[in-house]
Amino acid sequence: MNRFDKWEKPEIPEGKPTKYNWMVQHADNIKLGDKTDIGAFTYINAKNGVTLEDNVQVGSHCSIYSVSTIDGREGPVFLKKNCKIGSHSVIMPGVTVGENSIIGAFSFVNKDIPDNVVALGVPAKVKRDI
C-alpha cells in the first residue's frame, strides 16, 4: 500500500500547528496540491502566497517565507510538481523551485531553481541535472 493512498488535505489552523506539527501564518494564502508531504516543525509564512503543487515533499524543520522581515523582500513562493526540499532548508520570498528538482538538506534558497536539477548549499547552487 502506498503511504498516500488515503491522503487527504490537512486542516490548516491559522498560526497553530497542524496535526502533523507544521505551522502556517496567513493560512488563507497557502495552496496545497494533491499528496503533498510537509515535515514536522516546518514553518510557512504565506503572507504573499505559497503554492505547493502535487507530490511536493518538504522535510522537517524547514522555513518557507513569502516575506522577509530582515531585508523587506516579498513575493510568492512556488514549489513545483514533484520537487523535494531537504530538512532544515530555508526558501526565501519570490523563489520558484522547479518540477522534479531536489534541494539538499540545510540549503538556503534565495533564487529560482530550474526544473530537473539537484541544488544545495548556502546559497543553494545547481550541482547537477537529474
Image: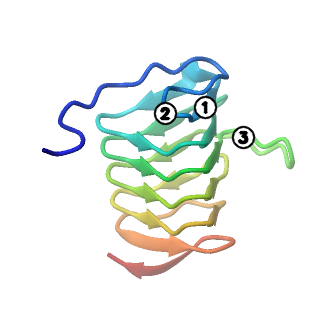
Can you give x and y, in whole percent of width and height, for residue 40 in the image? 54, 42
Quarter placement of the C terminus: bottom left
Calculate the distance from the C-alpha at mark 1 to the C-alpha at mark 3: 19 Å
Can you give x and y, in whole percent of width and height, for residue 83 in the image? 38, 56
Task: Give the label, 1 or 3, closer to the camera.
Answer: 1
- Front residue of 107/110: it is 107
Q: Earlier in the sequence, mark 2 or mark 3?
A: 2
Quarter placement of the N terminus: top left
Which residue is pictured at 62% across the width and 37% down the height? 44
Can you give x and y, in whole percent of width and height, for residue 71 in the image? 85, 49
- Tell me the tag on residue 51: none
Tag 3: amino acid: Glu
Tag 1: amino acid: Met
Figure quadrant of residue 98: bottom left
Residue tagged by mark 2? 20
Which residue is pictured at 57% across the width and 35% down the height? 22
Residue tagged by mark 1? 23
Q: Earlier in the sequence, mark 1 or mark 3?
A: 1
Calculate the distance from the C-alpha at mark 2 to the C-alpha at mark 3: 27 Å
Residue tagged by mark 3? 74
> SS for tag 2?
loop
Tag 2: amino acid: Tyr
Residue farthest to the bottom, as pictured: 128
Decide: marks 1, 3 in contact (CB < 8 A)?
no
